[in-house]
Amino acid sequence: MAVIEPRKISGILSSGQIIINSNLEQTFLLARGESENINVVILGSDWARIAWNDAFKSAKLEKMEDTTFNFEMQ
């Protein structure tokens, strides 16, 4: 699994100024073989390099112990 945090992506203008991603897309998970488009909005009058800033993290799946939940309707 991969944990993707688009909010951590930013742009670095040619002047060195860092512009944060103004798209507030939520964190999501990707399984092996899945793909997803990530929208990044960098507002500025210049070109920008993408700074990923740990936006991608891998996670191992671990089996959890069986758990029972009791639900009540009110």
Image (cartoon, grey):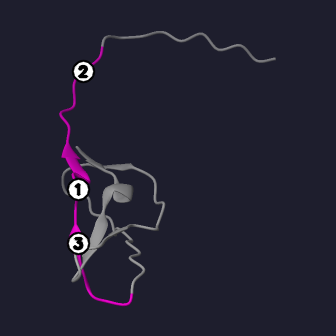
Does the magenta-highlighted stretch encompass residue 33? no
Magenta-drawn stretch, dominant element (helix, strand or loop): loop
To which residue does mark 2 refer? 63
Q: Position of residue 62 (x, y in %)?
A: 22, 24
The alpha-carbon separation of the residues under discs 2 and 1 comes to: 29 Å
> Split into 4 quadrants, where in the image is the N terminus?
top left
Query: Disc 3, disc 2: CB below 8 Å?
Result: no
Q: Position of residue 12 (x, y in %)?
A: 25, 73
**Where 31 sits versus 74, above or below?**
below
The alpha-carbon separation of the residues under discs 3 and 2 comes to: 36 Å
Secondary element type, mark 3 = strand
The residue depicted at 38 percent of the width and 90 percent of the height is 45
To which residue does mark 1 refer? 53
Q: Position of residue 8 (x, y in %)?
A: 33, 56
For discs 2 and 1, the disc positioned in front in the rendered view: 1
Question: Which is more toward the observer, 24 or 16?
Answer: 16
The residue depicted at 38 percent of the width and 76 percent of the height is 42
Q: Label 2 amino acid?
A: Lys
Q: Which residues are magenta?
A: 45-64
Does the magenta-highlighted stretch encompass residue 52? yes
Query: Disc 3, disc 1: CB below 8 Å?
Result: no
Question: Which is more toward the observer, 66 or 16?
Answer: 16
The alpha-carbon separation of the residues under discs 3 and 1 comes to: 9 Å
Q: Label 1 amino acid?
A: Asn
Mark 1 nearby-residue class (10 Å; few <14, some 14–19, many ≥20): few
Q: Label 3 amino acid?
A: Ile
- Left or right, residue 72 beside residue 34: right
Mark 3 nearby-residue class (10 Å; few <14, some 14–19, many ≥20): some
